[in-house]
Amino acid sequence: EARPYSGIVFFISISTWLWLEAIKPKQITEKRKYAYVAYILLSTLGAYLHYYVLMVTIAHIILTPLLTGLNKNIILRQMCLGGSVLVLFIPWLPYFLNGLSNKPDYLQMPTAYFFRNYQVYQYNDWELYFWIAVLLYGIHLIRCLRSVDWSLPPKSTATKYESEIFFAAWLALPAITLVILSWMTSPSVNHKSLLFTSPAAYILLARASVETGRLFPRGDILPLALVCTLFIHTLISVEYYTEPQKQPMREGIEYVHQHSQGEPVLSVPSPWFFRYYELALFEEESEWYNEGEQRSSFIDRVEQEGKGWVILANNSVEPYDIDGLLSEIENSTVVNEQKWQHKDLFDQGFVEVRVLEIMVNE
């Protein structure tokens, strides 16, 4: 039932730091080869944890020419490092390809407001902390602009602030690209698909807090205060993952497995919401229907077989319209309902797990 997100952020952060040390070292020493070995090992371990880390490794290869001025030796070395990671990942390739077939729920036509939402997600869904981060970003941006010597060529200015430009691009461009693709083609973005941008958000915030702290006496306390505050908030939020919080999800899934007997099951908000719990309990993943594009298929099958199930994490903010679903299934009614309560620690409205048994009357 463990989620991989913290591990993803850890491996992306440390592998990116090692990558920057490889292509732009602060000092050249004999110990650099240890950094190369560490990069290969940690990137490979991260790739086995989650394929996002593998994507970042590929991004390192692609970005190296842009940050090194097409230095052939550095480019060739990075290709060897990244290639070693890809070779070591080959044994896991079948699982990777199988994972690609599991399509998660994407936002339907995301709006510009999505950019704010996914940034809040980086900070435990704590909106106040997000706005503090925005304030510090703004102060740092203004200081950078005021320190620019406009008489110098743009290339010199870009070189001076290349770290800020790099991390800002890492933070913003993936979200912009995925949102535009969602508008132009099919939905392809959600908050978790942008998790690999978290290190950029944290590094930029660290840089902005250090630079802003220099404006005030004892301002060096500011970065420490920010880290401690977020850490304390994380410790409070971690109760979400304790045993009492997991139990309602487990019991709902177990009930469906015991009683559905191969009958159609609709999962709300999506099968992915319950996936890790189900794998931990039964070491398999059921082919439950998705509330989005598979809703009509679920309705057709219930009408054919006369029976179906709905398992949902009920959201008090946006309650699921079960009456609307029943109205689409001719002569249907709920004949059995089970509920399991849990705390809403993140204030997202998820307060209970419900299982509904639906019958079609002849």
Image: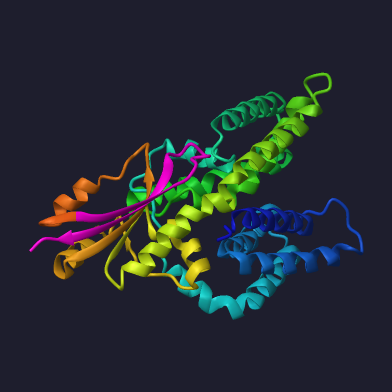
273 or 354, which lies in front? Answer: 354
Identify which residue is drawn at 44% across, 40% down.
114
Q: Quadrant of residue 74?
A: bottom right
Depicted 348 relative to depicted 246: above or below: above
Identify which residue is drawn at 77% across, 26% down.
213
Is 224 in the magenta? no
Tell me residue 357's x, y (percent): 26, 59
Residue 103 visible within the image: no
Residue 106 relative to residue 121: left or right: left
Q: Quadrant of the N terminus?
A: bottom right
Tell me residue 139's x, y (percent): 66, 25
Identify which residue is drawn at 48% across, 38% down.
117
Q: Over which residues does the magenta segment extend?
A: 334-362
Residue 219 visible within the image: yes
Tell me residue 135's x, y (percent): 61, 26
Please tell me how many numbered marks the rendered image carries: 0
Magenta span: predominant SS is strand
151 or 95, which lies in front? Answer: 95
Depicted 276 relative to depicted 173: above or below: below
Tell me residue 85's x, y (percent): 67, 71
Is 349 in the magenta? yes
65 or 338, which lies in front? Answer: 338
Residue 193 relative to residue 86: left or right: left
Which residue reaches farthest right? 30
